[in-house]
Image: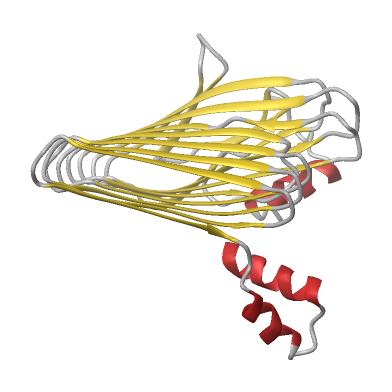
Amino acid sequence: MEENKINETDKKLLNEITNYDEIPQGAYNIRKNGQGIERRTTENVNIITKKDKPGISIYVKENTKFEFIHIPVIITESGLNDLVYNDFYIGKNANVIIVAGCGIHNDHHKNSQHDGIHRFYLEEGAKVKYVEKHYGEGKGDGQRILNPVTEVYLKEGSSMEMESAQIKGVDSTIRETKGELAANTNFVVTEKIMTNGTQIAKTIFDVKLNGENASTHVTSRSVATEDSKQEFTSKIYGNSKCFAHSECDAIIKDNARVIATPEITANNVDANLIHEAAIGKIAGDQIIKLKTLGLSEEEAENEIINGFLR
């Protein structure tokens, strides 16, 4: 584990994805250019480097309450292809907040890529809030590529809330979220994405409601501008008495394209599954209203977009 390797560029990336102004509270692991550079464990949270593959295993003791765990990744090396496997084992009745995400700075011509595979195993009664942000920057024409995979396995009575945001600067992303829910569990996902230029973003949700009274609520809000393209696919399987609500709301501008594909499968007569999708341009009356307040048309559009993604 290398020490004191965080420079000003690193701090800016960390601040974009985790609001990093100082060393974070609680347990943390900071990964830079494929290597762990800083780590702290606590009495209730242990972080262990995997021996068989790149990544870490995070163990949270049962009954742990309201601790923070930060596991950001930053890439500043052009041409790096980073793959990491992170597994979270959340003990019975624990309640923790996990902050993750990846920032890429690429000033050169080679592509920089991070593929993060995160698996969450929640024991009975456990609760997790998981916040994940993705961000790209740099003057080079090398692409900034992020492909996050999140797998969630909820035992009876557990719940997880996931907030995922792609802020800007990501040229290509495939975002996969999978869930398997036992009885009396709840999985809430909120996703926000913005694309421009020729950027491509693809989102796939695949949630299996296996236990009685399992529930999920998936919300995707996105803005696609210029020549960018987004695809949203939601697959939900109701295998018991359960409830699911999936919604995709998107704003498009210029020559952008957004494709929303719902797939809901009821394998039980008491499965209650709902999907909604709305895609369109910014309403003209909204722009007119803001222009009366002294904003230009461009400023009015930006205000509406920022409010939509807030």
Q: How is the image coloured?
A: secondary structure
| Residue in the image at 11% along x and 45% along y | 241
The quarter of the image holding the N terminus is top right
Q: Relative to 1, does residue 254 appear above or below in the rendering?
A: below
- Left or right, 108 with respect to 114, comes to right
Above or below for 51 versus 92: above
Q: In the image shown, does 6 or 119 lie closer to the viewer? A: 119
- Quadrant of the snapshot with the C terminus: bottom right
Q: Nearer the viewer, residue 92 or 110?
A: 110
Q: Residue at x 66, y 27 (%)?
A: 114
**In the rendering, at what x and y percent does residue 254 appear?**
74, 54
Q: Residue at x 79, y 24 (%)?
A: 111
| Relative horizontal placement of residue 271, taking residue 177 as reference (left or right) | left
Residue 192 position, x and y percent, is: 56, 53
Q: Nearer the viewer, residue 29 or 158?
A: 158
Q: Is residue 20 left or right of residue 233?
A: right
Query: Is residue 310 visible to the viewer in this orientation of the structure?
Result: no
> In the image, residue 270 lies at what x, y percent?
9, 46
Report whether 128 appears left or right of 252: left
Q: Is residue 19 visible?
A: yes
The part of the image, by quadrant, that contains residue 200 is top right
Quarter-of-image position of residue 303: bottom right
- Across and down, in percent, residue 43 comes to 42, 40
